[in-house]
Image: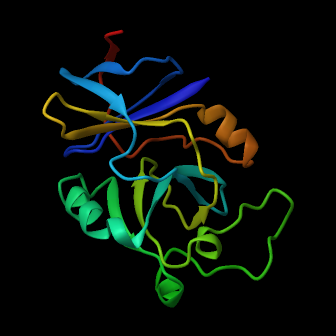
Amino acid sequence: MQQLILTLRPPSKAALDTDRSGGHLLIDGTPAWGRFPPWGSCPDILFESESRVLCGVAYGVHPKFRVLVKDLVALMDHAAVRYREFRADNAARDVASVPASPPDPKAIPWTAQHFPDWDYVEVVWSVNRPDTCGLAQLADDTWFYTGSGDVLALRIRYLDEITETYDLTLPDHFALPALEVSYLD
């Protein structure tokens, strides 16, 4: 099984690794502890529709968390992380328009159909640019924090299962430089 660990503070870096459990890591020399995201949300997937490359994940932001999350994202590396308003009235200016019906049985439901007034935090690691946000509600993500409580990194586990389930592939190249990670537990 594969997992991806990427730092969220500038400059973002990424490491593709075999899946190992552990909530205490040394990430580029900084001790970090794994916990839940800073706000309640399970990530959805971002992919490029033509190539079907998994490009990243998107976390829904309920309206009551907008201010908190915008402040948090302001501290992150905007080459990899961005805050997106993705409400129905903005759909024409956003990632893509909502299709009338799924194009095939492996199609992924669109998040805007399920959470019409939510914004999103997109985390993208691929040189491929996502044009589709699909409902996945992944449960095996871990956010890593420094000893002072600052957000440091994100881990997405079971990439091989995600790509198989949604008929996607991993990117050939990551948009981020290599990250050094070791397990402390």
Q: Check the picture and name the quadrant holding the N terminus.
A: top right
Residue 78 image point, x, y percent = 26, 58
Relative vertical location of residue 114 with respect to residue 127 in this rendering, above or below: below
Residue 135 image point, x, y percent = 64, 59
Q: Is residue 147 left or right of residue 16?
A: left
Relative vertical location of residue 53 with respect to residue 101 in this rendering, above or below: above
Residue 31 image point, x, y percent = 21, 21
Q: Residue placed at 54% from the left, 32% from the top?
A: 157
Q: Residue placed at 31% from the left, 37% from the top?
A: 153
Q: Residue placed at 29% from the left, 55% from the top?
A: 79
Q: Check the picture and name the quadrant holding the C terminus.
A: top left
In this figure, what is the number of numbered marks? 0
Question: Residue 112 lies in what quarter of the image?
Answer: bottom right
Q: Residue placed at 63% from the left, 53% from the top?
A: 136
Relative vertical location of residue 23 with respect to residue 155 in this rendering, above or below: above
Outermost residue on the top side: it is 185
Question: Residue 34 lies in what quarter of the image?
Answer: top left
Question: Residue 178 lies in what quarter of the image?
Answer: top left
Outermost residue on the front side: it is 64
Q: Is residue 121 left or right of residue 104?
A: left
Q: Is residue 154 left or right of residue 48?
A: left
Residue 179 showing in the rendered view:
no
The one nearer the camera, 171 or 60, is: 60
Residue 71 showing in the rendered view:
yes
Outermost residue on the right side: it is 105
Relative vertical location of residue 9 with respect to residue 62 in this rendering, above or below: above
Q: Is residue 21 left or right of residue 158?
A: left
**What color scheme is it?**
rainbow
